Amino acid sequence: MRGDPTLTTMKYTEAFFDLDGTITDSGKVIMECAAYSLRFFGYEDQPEEKLRKFVGPSLMDSFQTLYGMSEDEARKATGIYRGLYETDKMYDVTIYDGIVELLSSCRKAGISCYVITSKVEASAKQIIKKFDLDRYFTDVIGPDPCDPSSDKKRLIERAIDRYSLDRNHCIMIGDTHFDIDGAVGAGIDSIAVTYGYGDLSSLEKAGPTYVASVAGEVWEVLRD
């Protein structure tokens, strides 16, 4: 391994991080809020395996895809979910081991970090600030409450356009195929992290540039 990396020797100078399942272990609270919302529609005692699929995509996408809801039903379900999440549960998360060290290393090396998330942007910013992580990020980019899409390509493109970034030096880090699909669509490299809530087979099928099992392995990719 080399010594201390510098911007003149590092390939990646812009790192895009997913939030849920990559920075924060938020699966339990997401599943709890999803189950709470689903009970209003008669779905009792939903299996954890199915509820886990709410971590990553947009809520509208999940309610429509997983439960066949109409657009109106999905909007109502999303509103019920957010009513519980935003008033009582939003901060019931933990930061994954090694993430603070990873972000600190990126900052010391001159790598600019961004959050790219399907979570409503305002909520994502509140979470990042609550856990004192905002000092590590140039920006937090997510959809507004009316945006139902899980397509992360347009969020990545927003960051690239907003900051006039060189795609050759950008990389997306995330735990689901939505993150990897977004990176592929935007023409940038990616790291699939396997410690989150994504399915390994779907991650591999999406075609990540690298795979990492812990935050320290993400840094190994970024520093080389």
Image (cartoon, rainbow, N blue to C red):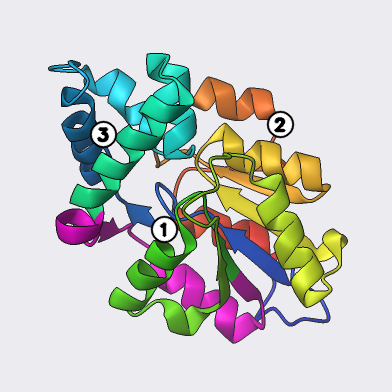
Of labels 1 and 3, earlier in sequence is 1
Q: Residue at x 13, y 17 (%)?
A: 45
Query: Which amino acid, by three-letter code, is at mark 3?
Result: Ala
Please provide percent x and percent y for residue 191.
Answer: 62, 47
Q: Residue at x 48, y 69 (%)?
A: 102
Name the element at disc 2: loop
Q: Write down the region rendered in magenta.
A: 86-113
**Screen quadrant of the C terminus:** bottom right
Name the element at disc 3: helix
Q: Which residue is mark 2?
A: 207
Please provide percent x and percent y for residue 65.
Answer: 47, 20
| Residue 223 visible in the current orientation | no
Determine crowd level at label 1: few under 14, some 14-19, many 20+ residues with C-alpha closer than 10 A.
Answer: many
Of labels 3 and 2, earlier in sequence is 3
Would you say residue 41 sits in the magenta stretch? Answer: no
Would you say residue 112 sits in the magenta stretch? Answer: yes
Q: Which residue is mark 1?
A: 23
Q: Residue at x 37, y 33 (%)?
A: 54
The Cα–Cα distance between marks 2 and 1, rounded to whole angstroms, is 21 Å
| Residue 38 visible in the current orientation | yes
**Screen quadrant of the N terminus:** bottom right
Of labels 2 and 1, earlier in sequence is 1
Whether residues under marks 1 and 3 lie with C-beta atoms below 8 angstroms apart, the answer is: no
Q: Which residue is mark 3?
A: 34
Most extreme residue toward the front, as rendered?
A: 72
